[in-house]
Image (cartoon, grey):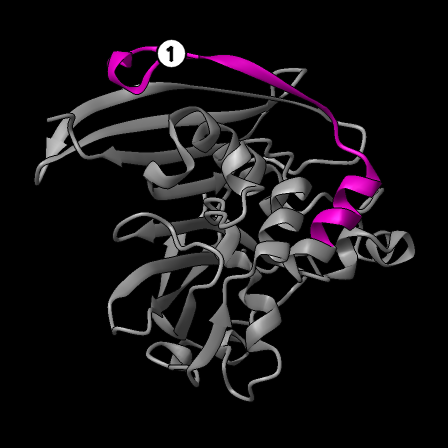
Amino acid sequence: MVDKAAEGAQGATFEMEIERGKIYELATAIKADHPAYFAASPVAPPTFLTTTFFWEERVPGANPWALVKMDQRRGMHAEQEYEFFGPPPRAGDKLTCRSTITRVFEKAGKRGGQMTFVVMETDFVDATGRLVARAKMTGVETAPTTEAT
Amino acid sequence: MKPWGEWREGDALEANHLGEVTRTDVVRYQGASGDMNPIHHDEPFARAAGFDAPLVVGMFQAGALCAWAAGIFGPEAVRRSRVRWQARVWPGDRLVLSGKVTKRYDDAGEDRLDVELFCHKDDGELCVTAWMTFARAPLA
């Protein structure tokens, strides 16, 4: 069950380095065949920043999503967005990242029952302090199944 | 492939038949992305959660859809990708990617294209909708 108190929670900052091998691997996995992803200094594919998984998991407190306490049996990934404030990052870029639970809100579901949405934003800043990208993940928890007793 | 300058509002992209999604595709995607949720590869775990099979990671089809469009309009021109999941995908499903240009406009001196994209199963069920923005500096 989503804990509304998680709204505003901010994770510890973590570092992420954009790597050629990881771009090659992810591009292959999503069946992307543009040569730009396999060049000597490749650009990151549109959804590449999903690989923050590898960088945040060893930094205690980096991922505030755990504080949301979403019920995994009723929770799912509803939307995902990546915004770039210029060309997407490329291999060799070193980014400093920080995630924040920006919003927790409820909406009536189409089939009745309350749905709880949670939005987490992650900012990616380069070595000069420029905001390079912002990821926005929206998760949703559906209402518990109501059973006649 | 059509040059950047010739894309107009309403132009459709030629559909891309991605083919059948296999368990190997899912395993490869999970290793590459770092999302190791067992519901996507551990059959007994997926069954215990009430599914008939491990469900495909949503970011696999979303990533394929966005990267396909980026291959058409330019990987370095990507400025925004937003995806919404509408149906679960299972190993064995055959996916078809399609889309159209919804807007061409100037934004602070950049030549921009907005594109709407779809990932359907070959039986017509819509799995993912995506919205992307691409930008290039206009030719002098």
Instruction: Indicate the quadrant where residue A56 lies.
Output: bottom right
In the rendered structure, the answer to whether residue A71 lies left or right of residue A93 reads right
Magenta range is B1-30
- Indicate the position of residue B126 as horizontal and vertical percent values: 55, 25
Badge 1 is on which residue? B2
Quadrant location, the C terminus of chain B: top left
Q: Amino acid at mark 1?
A: Lys
Furthest residue in direction bottom, as rendered: A60
Q: Is residue B28 magenta?
A: yes
User: Would you say residue B113 is visible in this rendering?
Assistant: yes
Q: Chain of mark 1?
A: B
Instruction: Classify mark 1: helix, strand or loop.
Output: loop
> Is B120 drawn above or below residue B53 in the view shown?
above
| Foreground residue among B48 and A66 | A66
Residue occupying the point 58% across, 17% down = B16
Residue B66: image location, x then y, percent: 48, 36
For the N terminus of chain B, the image quarter is top left
A2 left or right of B132?
right
